[in-house]
Image (cartoon, rainbow, N blue to C red):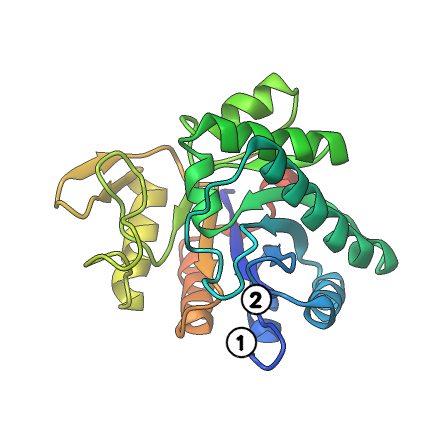
Amino acid sequence: MKYIDLNSDLGESFGNYKLENTDAILDIISSANLACGFHAGDPMVMNQTVAKCVEKGVVIGAHVGYPDLQGFGRRKMDLTFDEIYNFTLYQLGALEAFTRIHGTRIRHVNGHGALGNLSHKDEKVAHAIVKAAHDFDPSLLIAAPRASSCMVKYAEQYGMGVIGNMFHVDRNYEEDLALVPRGTPQAMIEDEDVALARVIRAIKENKVVAVTGKDIDIAPPKRILIHGDQPKALIFAKKMKDALDAEGIGICYSADMPVEE
């Protein structure tokens, strides 16, 4: 049987800014990347979201980003290696405070927004994040969308495991498989039926149409990411699960998948 890790970015409310449907999405997914207080998430939200993940059996990853609440972590910042290293450690420590009291642990590290995008092509950024993750807990897995990511290079250098082959449900791709930058035309896929058809084709045929119209070969997806802050997140999650069920594809965290028969 084939399996997919249905993954979502969650815990991104902050103060009076509330994102709905977190509980309903947690009923569907197998893993979540939780905001750690820098781009989103506050102590109340982190505590509540970790508790809900434990209740619903959802695996937790740390979604580390720039210290940019106003810009939701989607604006590039010019930081030194030490700053990125220490900011990553800080966020891991904050999230672990809550995972510890709820009897669970952080399983992976996933870069968010501008920091995450840069980590796949900037060696300094990738090195700083991975070194911080290694020094914090060498058993952590490093999340990367594809084998060419700088994050994979440094994960291998530090002897850390990787969870890769991620496919974005609601984003368009360039021909080099980089995401079309937010704020530019066609960056987002808003029609859930179009998005789901792309995902199923990616899983079955290992292909995706780039924003240019060119058909691109991709590695077999293992993780399907739904952005929890977009308005149709719950609709995408529900339809994604229904589509996987119809194809006879199970939902399971990447590192816990049984061997395919």
Could you tell me if residue 258 is visible in this image? no
Which mark is first along the chain, 1 or 2?
A: 2
Q: Quadrant of the C terminus?
A: top right
Q: Are marks 2 and 1 in contact (CB under 8 Å)?
A: yes
Q: Quadrant of residue 97?
A: bottom right
Q: Quadrant of residue 191?
A: bottom left
Q: Nearer the viewer, residue 119 or 146?
A: 119
The amino acid beneath tag 2 is: Glu
- Few, some or many residues within 10 Å of mark 1 (<14, 14–19, 20+): some
Residue 220 position, x and y percent, is 39, 36
Q: Is label 2 in a helix, a strand or a loop?
A: loop
Residue 136 position, x and y percent, is 75, 36
Q: Is label 1 in a helix, a strand or a loop?
A: loop
Residue 52 position, x and y percent, is 71, 68
Q: Nearer the viewer, residue 4 or 230?
A: 230
- Few, some or many residues within 10 Å of mark 2 (<14, 14–19, 20+): many
Which residue is label 1 attached to?
19
What's the distance in space between the residues labelled 2 and 1, CA to CA? Answer: 7 Å
Could you tell me if residue 110 is visible in this image? yes
Q: Nearer the viewer, residue 229 or 40?
A: 40
| Residue located at (59% from left, 25% from top) | 155
Residue 143 position, x and y percent, is 54, 39
Tell me the number on the disc at residue 12: 2
The amino acid beneath tag 1 is: Leu
| Residue located at (50% from left, 28% from top) | 124
Residue 31 higher or lower than 222, as above or below:
below
